[in-house]
Amino acid sequence: MKFLLFSLMFAAVNCAEVGTQTKEAFILAHKQPLSTYAVENMDFVLEYGLYNVGDKPAQKVTIDDRHSFPTNSFEIVKGLLHVHYEKIPAGSNVTHSVVIRPRAFGFFNYTAAQVTYYTDNENLHVTLTNTPGEGYIYRQREYDRRFAPKYTYFIVFFLIIAPTTFGSFLLFQQSKSRFPVIIKKKTT
């Protein structure tokens, strides 16, 4: 009975292992914002990652994300939204970063980027990255109000509190000087 159970488990593991092997190039792609907040007229960094988990290299790999960030709503500061790699070897990865600057505020839907590649036998494969989903682009003023340092408020607070604190200190020093300090001697 134990031998039969052991042989069934061994067969199941071998079948599962054979089923997960890929003989061609297979690209897994992701798109991830690296900036915590999207703010109008401030840089927003995106990272694209391509992982070839197949057994053969992927040829003529392209990432195309131009439809996600139209030029009337976003300014491209650094990087390209359409990138071409000649070859991604088996078992390796490639990352690509783009810095964009939103021109307007409000809700924005971050869609998936399209990745195309060819396998060794010249079959075209099309895949999509993950979709970060809907995000909010903050106004510059709203972002400053919520997240920027409040140095001016602290300076104004200090200027308002300083006269009363300094005045109290002067009154304390004046009353202290009126009364003599009496030192008691300790007897041991």
Image (cartoon, rainbow, N blue to C red):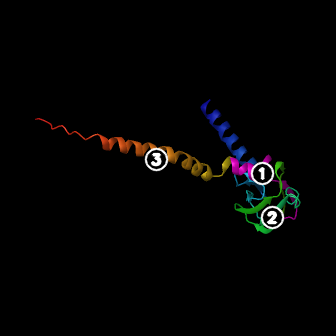
| Left or right of 37, for residue 172 | left
* Residue 1 place in picture, x, y as percent: 62, 29
The CA span between labels 3 and 2 is 53 Å
Residue type at numbered disc 3: Phe
Q: Do the residues bearing badges 1 and 3 touch, measured as CB atoms within 8 Å?
A: no
Residue, x 70% and y 40% (percent of image)? 12
- Identify residue type, mark 2: Ile
Which mark identifies residue 166?
3
Looking at the image, residue 110 sits to the left or right of residue 155; the answer is right
Q: Which residues are magenta?
A: 120-145
Residue 44 shows up from this direction: yes
Local SS, label 1? loop
Residue 104 figure quarter: bottom right
Residue beneath the point at 77% across and 66% down: 77
Circle nearer the N terminus (1, 2): 2
Instruction: Give residue 76's mark.
Output: 2
Nearest the viewer among 43 and 28 is: 43
Mark on residue 139?
A: 1
What's the residue at 53%, 45% (across, down)?
161
Q: Residues within 10 Å of mark 1 (few under 14, many from 20)?
A: some
Give, as a three-letter code, the residue at label 1: Arg
Q: Secondary structure at mark 3?
A: helix
The C terminus: image quadrant: top left
Q: Is there any visible trace of residue 21 in the rendered image?
A: no
Q: Indicate which label's residue lies in the foreground, 1 or 2.
A: 1
Q: Position of residue 75 (x, y in %)?
A: 82, 63
Q: Mark 2 falls on what kind of element?
A: strand
